[in-house]
Amino acid sequence: GLRVTDAETMEIAEMVLNRVNKSLVAKVQALGVNAIGISGKDGKLLTVKKKLSGGEDIGFVGEVTKVNGKVLLDLLEKDFLPIVCPVGLDDDFQTYNINADDAACAIAKAVVADKLVFLTDIEGLYKDINELAFLSDIPGVCKDKDDPSTLISELTIPEARELMTNGIVGGGMLPKLGNCIDAIEQGVSRVHILDGRIAHCLLLEFFTNKGI
């Protein structure tokens, strides 16, 4: 989940991320919400250090060391919704790319969010005894990819750790579950992983008995 990022790639990534950020701001504004797009560099919102992959230097990839939550809380207090671009600065003011899940988790912990939601573009990762496979018609994590009745819709921290340890979940779901555990242990009340392609997924998750 870490993208090797040299100086040229970092410059391009920052341009693209900022463009996506302003596109999201425009869409939210069109819905009648006052939104402000900011970078993790603004107000030193996200301070980072170089993140290594297995001890190897992979370039300008940052690990969040500090979050200036006051930047976000001040905007929220004035009824502005901050939309954050996951780019940060180190102590020498060098720009770094940040994994978006890591940035979201760090921010949620810093502001002691009631909920942290990861929107994905996959329906879930499943594993049976022999293979990892994606299942197209059931969202979430299943103990058995061929049995919809084994869908796991809610996990405690010990249960999530057990799934990670015994290999029931793998691939991209591993770092997501790791971030979920980290956030809850740092004071976030509840964490959700949702398929963002489902229309109104947030409303369905929060305001129906079963959720999605």
Image (spheres, grey):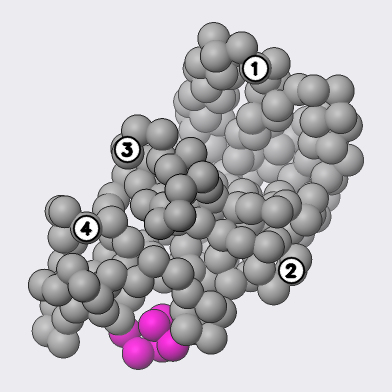
Q: Secondary structure at mark 4?
A: loop
Image coordinates for residue 169, horizontal then vertical, percent: 32, 75
Q: Secondary structure at mark 1?
A: loop
Residues at circles 4 and 2 in contact by the CB criterion of under 8 Å? no
Work out whether 141 lies above or below 107.
Answer: below
Horizontal relation, residue 74 to residue 164: left or right: right
Q: Which mark is residue 138?
A: 4
Q: Earlier in the sequence, mark 4 or mark 1?
A: 1
Residue ID for mark 1: 33
Residue drawn 32% across the image and 39% down it: 198
Q: Earlier in the sequence, mark 3 or mark 2?
A: 2
48 part of magenta stretch:
no
For the N terminus, the quadrant is bottom left
Magenta region, residue range: 162-167
Task: Give the foreground label among 4 and 3.
Answer: 4
Query: Dot 1, how many residues are within 10 Å of its Cα: few (below 14), some (14-19), or many (20+)?
Result: some
- Amino acid at the residue labelled 3: Arg
Residue ID for mark 3: 197
Q: CA distance from mark 4 to mark 2?
A: 30 Å
Residue ID for mark 2: 186
Task: Give the foreground label among 2 and 1.
Answer: 1
